[in-house]
Image: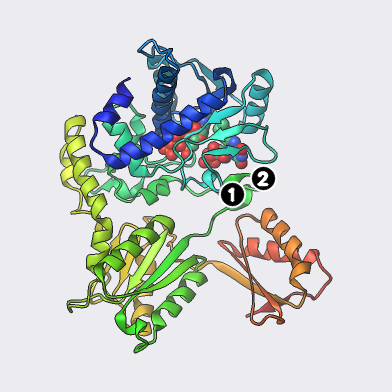
Amino acid sequence: MEIDKAIGESDDTRLKTKYNNAIFVIKRAFSLYSIEEVAFSFNGGKDSTVLLHLLRAGYFLHKKELSCSNGGLSSFPVRTIYFESPSAFTEINAFTYDAAQTYGIQLDIIRQDFKSGLEALLKANPIRAIFLGVRIGDPTAVGQEQFSPSSPGWPPFMRVNPILDWSFRDVWAFLLTCKVKYCSLYDQGYTSIGSIHDTVPNALLSVNDTSSKEKFKPAYLLSDGRLERAGRVKKNASTKNDVGSDSQKHEVLLASVIAVGDEILSGTVEDQLGLSLCKKLTSVGWSVQQTSVLRNDIDSVSEEVDRQRSICDMVFIYGGVGPLHSDVTLAGVAKAFAPDEEFEEYLRHLISEHCTGDRNEMAQLPEGITELLHHEKLSVPLIKCRNVIVLAATNTEELEKEWECLTELTKLGGSTSLLELYASRRLMTSLTDVEVAEPLSKLGLEFPDIYLGCYRKSRQGPIIICLKGKDNARIDSAVQALRKKFKEGVFVDMK
Ligand SMILES: Cc1cc2nc3c(=O)[nH]c(=O)nc-3n(C[C@H](O)[C@H](O)[C@H](O)COP(=O)(O)O)c2cc1C
Ligand SMILES: Nc1ncnc2c1ncn2[C@@H]1O[C@H](COP(=O)(O)OP(=O)(O)OP(=O)(O)O)[C@@H](O)[C@H]1O
Ligand SMILES: [Mg+2]
């Protein structure tokens, strides 16, 4: 089986692990459900293309274990469904139909919306489980595991997500290692594909060109996989009001703040920057997941940065930046990224064999992944390594300036900065927590795009409720909805 062989021959241990885990999930699903009871939701996107080949390999290996493999796989036995929409890219449609033909797939084309289409499908067929190419980081992945029952309000079936824990780079390592075809849009700078109305090439892959037509590098050259959806035009949050859908939650971005300094740990210096940074991040709607203080030690820094960058959207690190012997922060950050640099070397090698297009593209890759964020107001640039930002500030005034510049510099080609002010409001109430608990969780379901936080200043004291979101009008509606649930005047607005 060519996919299993290609991965077996590869020396990419990370890819092998991801592959083996995904195959394990697929084989378990084939053991749990009969072939008539499973379906594959295929849409020609990169993630579902990965899944197509994993399913081909998984089915082959499952059969082999049952010793009834005939050694090859001429047709694909899993019922495959494609929700075709008039707003799909023609390239996506063409690729989906092409792949079906190449791999002997019988495509069930569904021309209804997902929910109605699935209802009809499940009524007419004994399907109990559906394979999806959903990955952590997709808005629809929130709360899902490799085996996740469909959401309330959806027809009952098991969602099987074998590549849930795959990153953007894992997807490309797989497609390039296995040398399989993928939709041509990915070679034109598209990194995640929705409909023609909400998807453009990823501006981060734009190549400065003097000719009038903007050019883009292929998707696999996107150095920061977290920005895979930068080519998706944001949908209006207020149009997503279908309660119960996994896709609407998690508008809040997660941050981690790391201070480096022996002098903080010994109590010689008080860390003011952490406090100030947490306030700033919170004021723009980010949720700070953790603050930590580390010794001036390269390994401590690299381990913490590595851990935090994989669980947070952005890591902010300060202290220990400079030329002194104790300034090890940059070395620690660099060490945290070392495996990725190795991976880029490997990708370079892989692509020079595989790619028939412009080979020089790879040579244009920055040395590694570091960006220097220059700003006229700053004497030294800010440093950004993927989702880690190194701040050079040593006091709160310097931080103020760097923050201002960062806000301007992180405008990702559009008009909105990642750090632009969010709308927020705080209410105080002397109701008990038992009285507010249930109405508040209901409010959370009615306004999934709004972050709802609660705290109190003392055990017996009043409860303070924070509402944060992108839009003042939405916050006002949520406050109104909350007030309606209680007698008048029980919530007092706070500054
Ligand atoms: C086979 C299949 C099953 C789905 N099951 C669910 C589900 O159980 N719950 C849910 O909220 N959405 C479900 N969805 C919808 C997706 O979460 C998501 O809304 C859809 O893929 C559209 O993504 P987009 O808004 O990025 O285009 C399902 C979609 C498909 C294709
Ligand atoms: N129109 C559709 N028809 C069938 N399955 C779909 C459709 N849209 C989404 N899916 C399922 O949901 C999964 C996740 O969709 P998503 O758009 O995140 O990934 P993708 O299309 O495979 O890749 P990309 O992120 O590059 O668009 C798909 O892999 C597929 O299993
Ligand atoms: Mg897609």
Position of residue 42 relative to residue 294, above or below, is: above
The residue shown at (33%, 30%) is 184
Is residue 287 visible in the rendered image? The answer is: yes
The residue shown at (64%, 64%) is 475
Amino acid carrying mark 2 in the image? Asp
Find out if the beta carbon at label 2 lies less than 8 Å from the nearest ligand 1 atom: yes
User: What sort of colour scheme is used for the picture?
Assistant: rainbow
Q: The C terminus appears in which quarter of the rendering?
A: bottom right
Is residue 219 visible in the rendered image? The answer is: no
With 263 as the anchor, is 124 left or right in this view?
right
Expressed as whole percent of the image width and height from the top left, the position of residue 377 reads 28, 76
Expressed as whole percent of the image width and height from the top left, the position of residue 393 reads 31, 78
Who is closer to the viewer here, 211 or 89?
A: 89
Position of residue 221 relative to residue 452, above or below, is: above
Q: Which residue is mark 2?
A: 242
The residue shown at (54%, 56%) is 251
Q: Which residue is mark 1?
A: 248
Assess disc 1: are there few (<14), some (14-19) or many (≥20) residues with their C-alpha within 10 Å of its C-alpha: many
The residue shown at (44%, 41%) is 199
